[in-house]
Image (tube, rainbow, N blue to C red):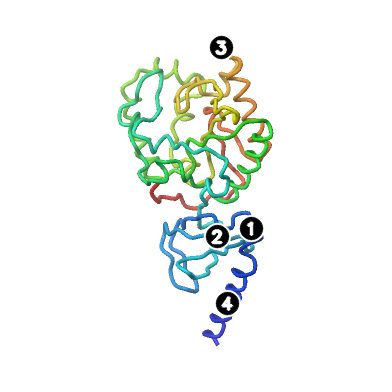
Amino acid sequence: MKKFATMFFFVIMSVIIGVTASAASPAAGCSIRTTKNIETQVGVIPQDSRLSVVDESAGGFIADYNGNVVEISFDDCLINVKDFIPSIDCWLDMAQPQNMFSMADEQIPGLTDRQFYHNPGSADGSEAWLRYEACVKLKSAQQEFLADGYSIIIYDAYRPFTCTKEFQAAYRAYLNTKSFAFKKQWFGSLGESWFLAQKASSHNYGVAVDMGLKRVSDGYVLPMPSAIHTLDIRSAFVSWGSVTNSEAADNARYMKSVMEGSGFTYLKSEWWHFQDNSIVRNSVIDIPN
């Protein structure tokens, strides 16, 4: 009986592939990555396996894994943003030999110009990963930006937990060399904890993006209150009123308005950071980028 049920499952799924792959789900054809080992009818699919989406089921994907049709819960995978929203630009700062992390116009030893991501797709901008629910909201935001003549640039999305821990260690070591007065000046009333995740980051759950905007007509990157990944008060929402470039503050407010309207929450200390707080966060994800 069990053998018959398994055969019946594959027959039904084969019909789904043949009839609806053209189909129904906006994610059809997109690449997904498993975030843990998953038991399926064809055996265990290892963590960090890549599959191609065929369609959606209730709460998950129907996907092709090495010629087999399997069901994968949205909770157990990430989707490639570039597949799902091809118009978005990806330039993952942490995948580059030179990155833009700084504080008080100083480089941060062990953090600035350190390459954290090594997958070819991370380096060349062909992939960035998010939970599907967040990616759907990001697509809605992108459509609104495009209607206004702008497009999202993603500087970071899913971030492995190992990278966050390495980031924290390097930044703490740097801050340990600084005086109380220095920290007070450059963190302001927000304090150190706003600029340094104390445990896991929302990036480690695949629910957050770091982003900017460009003008579609000529590729011009819109100015913002600070350079991306400036880890001090100049990046904080509360300081926009003191930004001398009013265009930069207006751009940040505009981006925030569209992202909040699409279901994201902004991080008070970083004009570039938005996260989907509606997604249940289970275990942190630690597959390499």
Side of 235 where 95 appears, left or right: left
**Helix, strand, or loop for circle 3?**
loop
Residue 23 rendering spot, x and y as whole percentages: 65, 61
Q: Quadrant of residue 137?
A: top right
Structural distance between the alpha carbons of marks 1 and 4: 20 Å
Q: Residue 53 carries which label?
A: 2
Q: Where is residue 226 in the image (x, y as percent from the top left)?
A: 50, 21
Return the residue nearer the eye: 152 or 266: 152
Quadrant assignment, res 58:
bottom right
Q: Is residue 63 above or below residue 253?
A: below
- The answer to whether 188 appears left or right of 217 in the picture is left
Disc 3 marks a residue whose amino acid type is Thr
CA gap, disc 2 and disc 1: 9 Å
Residue identifier under label 4: 9
Nearer to me, 244 or 103: 244
Question: Which image quarter holds the N terminus?
Answer: bottom right
Closer to the observer: label 2 or label 4?
A: 2
Badge 3 is on which residue?
244
Name the kind of residue labelled 2 in the image: Val
- Please report contact status of discs 2 and 1: CB closer than 8 Å, yes or no: yes
Q: Which mark is residue 25?
A: 1
Mark 3 vs mark 4: which is more N-terminal?
A: 4
Residue 57: x, y in percent? Answer: 62, 64
Which mark's residue is nearer the viewer, 1 or 4?
1
